[in-house]
Amino acid sequence: MSRFASHDFKNQKALIRVDFNVPLDAAYNITDDNRMRATIPTITKILKDGGSAILMSHLGRPKDGPTEKYSLKHLVNHLADLLSTSMGHSVTVVFADDCIGASATEASAALQPGQVLLLENLRFYKEEEKGDTAFAEKLSKLGDVYVNDAFGTAHRAHASTAVIAQFFPGDKKMFGLLMEGEVASAEKIMHKSEKPFTAIIGGAKVSDKILIIENLLERATDIIIGGGMAYTFMKAEGGSIGSSLCEDDRLQTALDLLKKAEAKGVNIHLPSDSVIADKFAADANISTAPSGEIPAGWMGLDIGENACEQFTNCILRSKTILWNGPMGVFEMEKFQHGTKAIATAVAKATQLGAFSLVGGGDSVAAVNQFGFADKVSYVSTGGGALLEYFEGKVLPGIAAIN
């Protein structure tokens, strides 16, 4: 049983680092509440035990202190609705217009069991991102127990995500349910993966994914490469890629990765064919071509039908699957077929018993958009944190509690 699940929060004030960095429209309406929903089970467990919850988060990147646009007060009503639904009765969410100082201290002192306090945006203070110890200590005084449930910020050594943990004894600091799930899923991929293990790596740039590919060469049996980054590999191998995306300064890197894979017996799968377009636009004229024979003036914007079949066959043979990055410009309808085909294959492989982890903003957006989020084993909220974990880096937010 985990430290969090076995802890009794009765009459305790749990100070929880959540990731409520959600998108807001011009009228301050939340346009995607997934990050808020993801941490509701953690808060609910604390309230049901008879404890209270003090939530701290950042929102956006405020440059000069308090800014209306980045105030967490815009989240209060929706948070109260989510918690009331989860608890089955009305939950009071109090808002403090600061995260330290008198208003935060007084609101925390007055908080009753079953109530929730949301603190104002941590990043209204420069000390948060600087990892300032004195600032972290002030935050720590608000609660009896520290719970980190913000995997999305675990790769940052900020005051509220890492530095604060030193002010709580070992039995009074822990991961929340979301963080536990994220860490367990990521560790299962990296350290307990059943073979065949297929990693599907997409996105625009090889440079963003070099470290993750290098680390996966030690673990995966197959690596599928799609998206814009595939054309850097194609060109490196002497193919013609027209005006497709290419990092010319990474051609040698691509060749080195292919050589390393060969030496380790890892199969690298590049898309055999592509859906090509005469411009980067939703109304472009489209055609298909082998990925290494794209005519001048045309660009690859999605994987082709043969590549879909080739990749699907590989995925269906797999026991462990990591998916990070789309296969094409899936935001445009003409170029979403490849990403959709991969999502379908991953869902089918999961149904057949594979463990699948989808992580990274665009892949997560894709599985949500195509309705496959509940058909894979785990959808990570991590983004940058997940990438750094798979690159083999130590995440400060995890290290601080472990």
Image (cartoon, rainbow, N blue to C red):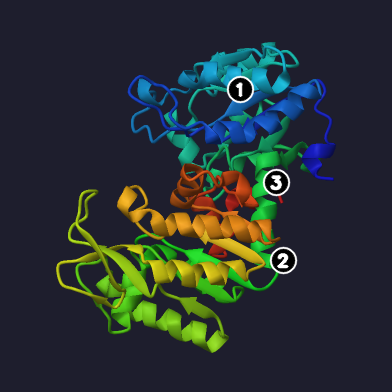
Residue at numbered disc 1: 82
| Residue 113 located left or right of residue 318 | right
- Kind of residue at badge 3: Glu
Q: What element carries label 1?
A: helix
Q: Looking at the image, is 258 positioned above or below residue 322?
A: below
Residue that badge 2 annotates = 192
- Identified by mark 1, the residue type is Leu
**x and y, in percent, of residue 368 in the image:** 50, 43
Residue at left offset 54%, top offset 67%: 199
Q: Quadrant of residue 250?
A: bottom left
Question: Which residue is at 55% across, 60% downward?
Answer: 345
Amino acid type, mark 2: Lys
Residue 303 at x, y = what percent? Answer: 37, 65
Between residue 247 and residue 141, name the one nearer to us: 247
What mark, if any, has residue 180 been given in the picture?
3
Q: CA gap, disc 2 to disc 3?
A: 16 Å
